[in-house]
Image (spheres, rainbow, N blue to C red):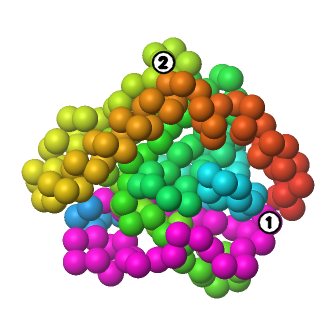
Amino acid sequence: MSPVSGCPTDLPRSPENIGFGSLVVARAWKFDGSPHWVVPGFYLGQDEFGHWLHQPAGSLVARPGTAHLAATNALCLIPHRGDWVATMYSDASEDFDVYIDLSSNVGWLQMKRDAWEINSIDLDLDVIRSRSKGTFLDDEDEFAEHALSMGYPQKLQDSVRDTSEQLLESVAENSPPFNHAHRESWLAKVAGLPTA
């Protein structure tokens, strides 16, 4: 475990021998070691951008003190490189279209029964494309507060800011993998899941 986080450290960025349809639990932590959101999904495969998961409507989405059932289907992208995790929504009734969590320590951990965890440390900032509000950076106040209260190193703060600017540009320009055309190929694979 990291001295500043409950998140396991030095995990690989890619899982070995993971099969289509494998259960993958996305487990986020905060920098001070406290647990954050946990969301289950199912492995779809990988491409040049990263590993893709299907997170179905009705899934239990939980963190300490609160929980809800996911209202819509979503795709989760775990990039091969970069300090972020992206969720993309397929239902036009959902206001969020793209939701990217700026994160560190992104890595895979194999569990029992051929299941996996993808662990990460949530660093507050979110790049969002909303159907009603457009593309914007969210939770800057929370980032500034936690940078002080949790002691984010300056190098980490600078890196997160740089990454958020790059992602804002990519999402605003509708570049792959954040465009709908790219995600359609992954949504098509959902019907083949044993859980579908």
Element at badge 2? strand
Left or right: residue 53 versus residue 101 is right
Q: Quadrant of residue 94?
A: top right
Magenta highlight range: 1-30
Residue at point 28%, 70% (across, down): 5
Residue 27 in view (yes/no)? yes
Residue placed furthest toward the top: 132
Q: Nearer the viewer, residue 10 or 53?
A: 10
Identify the residue position indicated by label 2 in the image. Answer: 134
Residue at point 31%, 59% (across, down): 30
Residue placed furthest toward the right: 192
On whether residue 22 falls in the magenta region, the answer is yes
Left or right: residue 56 versus residue 195 is left
Identify the residue position indicated by label 1 in the image. Answer: 20
Q: Nearer the viewer, residue 99 or 166?
A: 166
In this picture, is 103 found above or below 12?
above
Residue at point 84%, 57% (across, down): 193
What x and y, as percent, mark residue 192? 89, 55
